[in-house]
């Protein structure tokens, strides 16, 4: 099974991305949670344009990436799981769990550091939140995030199949929990006991600082509960809450070109507060 996953990795990634994207986009069209405040066509062109640019740049600038690092670490015997024997299922499960924890703390770090917030701010500048917001990140943030992930993979001696499964799951989860979908309250409550739901993550995109600095998880909801960053609901309610950042309400800031230069603009603010 491991060899099959690795051999078909690009097709698995693209197939699941497109499948989840289309599913959530259809769900948003049939049962939207909120009325969007800006034209969808313009937003989607910018957000998806940034997604395509990021994918191309990452492949060009970091051809090895996390899966390649896992294979190199295995070849040289680097890292925890390549030094000490562990059942393959345990190594895969532990890899996925620990990488998810790292992403949680990385997200908090990007909110705390002024320099990193200038990059991550691009994600929060979106005036609405839907399936395309899940992959809207500045290229430098994507590159830095990959560098952190690669380092952790080598230190863990993570099995390559565990890295592939984690990355596929993370991308799918990001599209799911950023989606503008209406979900039954009971289903949301049941799901968010394990994973981050759209209603849970939407709180994180509030203009209210206390709410924006909560619900940092992308996949498992466990980390926000354990580390006391969980916020159940926005104070204004999901239908009335304001998405984005105060002081940055001009839709022109969300064109592709403006998103690329946003971290270097003179009106760039310090860390999220």
Image (cartoon, rainbow, N blue to C red):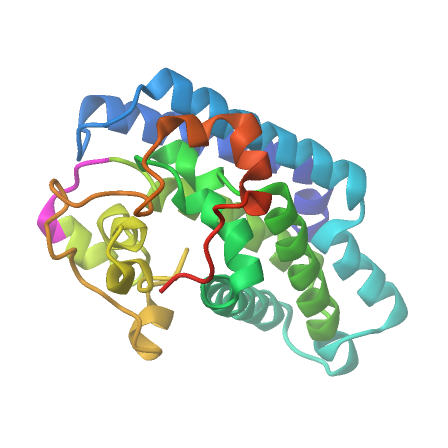
Q: Is residue 34 left or right of residue 45?
A: left
Q: What residue is drawn where x is 66% and y is 45%? A: 5
Residue 25 or 161: which is nearer the viewer?
A: 25
- Image coordinates for residue 15, horizontal then vertical, percent: 55, 30
- Image coordinates for residue 83, horizontal then vertical, percent: 78, 81
Q: What residue is drawn where x is 67% and y is 50%? A: 143
Q: What residue is drawn where x is 57% and y is 50%? A: 167
Residue 192 or 131: which is nearer the viewer?
A: 131
- Image coordinates for residue 125, horizontal then vertical, percent: 40, 41
Residue 213 seen in this snapshot: yes
Furthest toward the front, the residue is 266
In the image, residue 62 above or below residue 259:
below
In the image, residue 86 above or below residue 167:
below
Residue 130 position by quadrant: top left
Furthest toward the bottom, the residue is 84
Residue 178 position by quadrant: top left
Residue 25 or 230: which is nearer the viewer?
A: 230
């Amino acid at each position: 099974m491991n060899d099959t996953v690795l051999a078909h990795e690009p097709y698995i990634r693209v197939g699941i991305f497109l499948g989840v994207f289309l599913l959530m986009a259809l769900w948003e069209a049939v049962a939207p949670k909120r009325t969007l405040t800006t034209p969808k066509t313009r937003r989607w062109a910018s957000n998806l344009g940034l997604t395509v640019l990021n994918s191309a740049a990452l492949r060009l600038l970091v051809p090895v990436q996390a899966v390649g690092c896992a294979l190199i670490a295995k070849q040289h015997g680097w890292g925890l799981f390549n030094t000490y024997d562990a059942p393959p299922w345990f190594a895969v499960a532990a890899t996925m769990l620990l990488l998810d924890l790292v992403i949680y703390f990385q997200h908090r770090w990007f909110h705390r550091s002024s320099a990193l917030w200038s990059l991550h701010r691009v994600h929060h500048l979106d005036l609405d939140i839907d399936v395309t917001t899940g992959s809207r990140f500045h290229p430098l943030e994507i590159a830095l995030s990959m560098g952190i992930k690669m380092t952790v993979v080598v230190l863990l001696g993570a099995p390559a199949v565990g890295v592939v499964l984690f990355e596929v799951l993370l991308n799918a989860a990001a599209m799911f929990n950023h989606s503008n979908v209406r979900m039954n309250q009971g289903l949301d409550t049941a799901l968010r006991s394990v994973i981050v739901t759209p209603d849970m993550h939407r709180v994180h995109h509030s203009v209210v600082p206390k709410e924006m600095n909560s619900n940092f998880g992308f996949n498992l909801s466990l980390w926000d509960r354990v580390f006391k960053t969980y916020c159940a609901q926005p104070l204004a309610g999901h239908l009335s809450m304001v998405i984005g950042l105060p002081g940055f309400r001009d839709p022109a800031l969300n064109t592709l070109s403006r998103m690329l230069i946003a971290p270097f603009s003179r009106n760039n603010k310090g860390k999220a507060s």
